[in-house]
Amino acid sequence: MEDIAEIAISSALAGGLPALVARLGYHGTPTDRQDAAAVILHLAGYEDFRLPLAQAGAFSMLVQMLIDGTPDGKTVAAVALQNLTDRIETIAAIAAAGAIDPLVALLCNGTPAGREGAAHTLCNLALHRDNELPIGQSGAIEGLVSLLREGTPLGAVAAAAALRNLANNAENELTIVAAGGIEPLVNLLVGGSPHGRTEAAGALRNLAVDAENKVVIAAASAIEPLVVLLVDGTPGGRAEASGALENLAYDADNTVAIAAAGAIPALTELLIGGTLAGQDFAAGALQQMSLNAEYTASITAALAASVAKTLVHPPHL
């Protein structure tokens, strides 16, 4: 059997994109439609093919397949759209083609792979601010929280990432909390993969912008696992954890809990040797904590220790 990459490239180079996209239409057999979507999925991984695919009408045809395809066909269509939603221009066009509602339907009722693909694509669509609220009002948040609770490990990570992006909108923040999203995010933060822990921390960071959510997140026992991630996470995970702690520290009771969990030394180490985002978040968290005079001396001492440690063991460049 010819490799799908060879089929995809040969079809594109032969100028067959319009014919390929036409095979997605409902007049084709389920197998033919799914095969065509699989080729488009592969082509969508190449920057040079994305605009020609759009011009050939692939977006609307893939959306139609989300509506009336087989379960496996819907999954392939969702993943193809995921690959196409990596830039603002295509994100806007795919949303305008009506992708949100059928993606939410797949998220709520699809196969495990289909639900994961839908979550990834909704995550990408939510990168466009104009899509945040429409996605949030479409029932996606409830579906994402369900996937976060009950889905596969990869599905849970995709759900957390989508909730992170949707939580940039204030109304969505409230909906996520009302849907019970904080508890499964904390569970992922505690027991997930490195990527899952990072996405959970990012979602909690955005949710913690709201004053009431700061209290709810702390009550869900998020502070200690955030500090653990701050210490042992990936560079991205440590940055997200420090950002969440910064937002939580605007509540006075949370400041006490953050200090008690041992965050101050870890924040000063991140301030000295973290990523740019991590350094920025760590500085904000420490600044907020320093408003409590009880922690000024410990922050100063931890900063001195971190600087001394860096001088003895400078980071590798």
Image (cartoon, grey):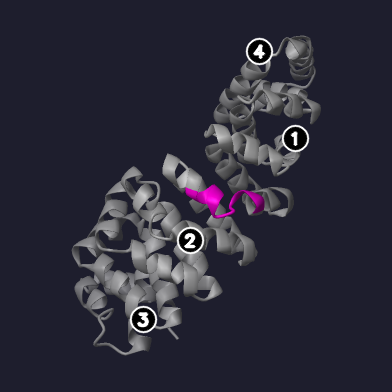
Q: CA distance from mark 1 to mark 4?
A: 23 Å
In the picture of the structure, the residue carrying the numbered disc 1 is 231
In the picture of the structure, the residue carrying the numbered disc 2 is 119
Residue 200 is left or right of residue 269, and the answer is: left
Q: Residue at x 33, y 55 (%)?
A: 47
Outermost residue, bottom side: 29
In this view of the protein, which residue sits in the foreground, 109 or 178? 178
In the picture of the structure, the residue carrying the numbered disc 3 is 69
Label 1 or label 2, whichever lies nearer to me, is 2
In the picture of the structure, the residue carrying the numbered disc 4 is 291
Q: Amino acid at mark 1?
A: Val
Q: Residue at x 33, y 82 (%)?
A: 33
* Extent of the magenta region: 175-183
**Residue 50 drawn at (x, y percent):** 29, 59
Q: Amino acid at mark 4?
A: Leu
The quadrant in which residue 255 appears is top right
User: Judging from the image, what secondary structure is the residue with disc 1 in?
Assistant: helix
Label 2 or label 4, whichever lies nearer to me, is 4
Q: Amino acid at mark 3?
A: Gly
Of pointers 1 and 2, the one earlier in the residue sequence: 2
In this view of the protein, which residue sits in the foreground, 37 or 215? 215
The answer to whether one can see residue 45 in this image is: no
Of pointers 3 and 1, the one earlier in the residue sequence: 3
Structural crowding at the residue carrying mark 2, measured as other residues with C-alpha within 10 Å and reported as few (<14), some (14–19) or many (≥20)? many
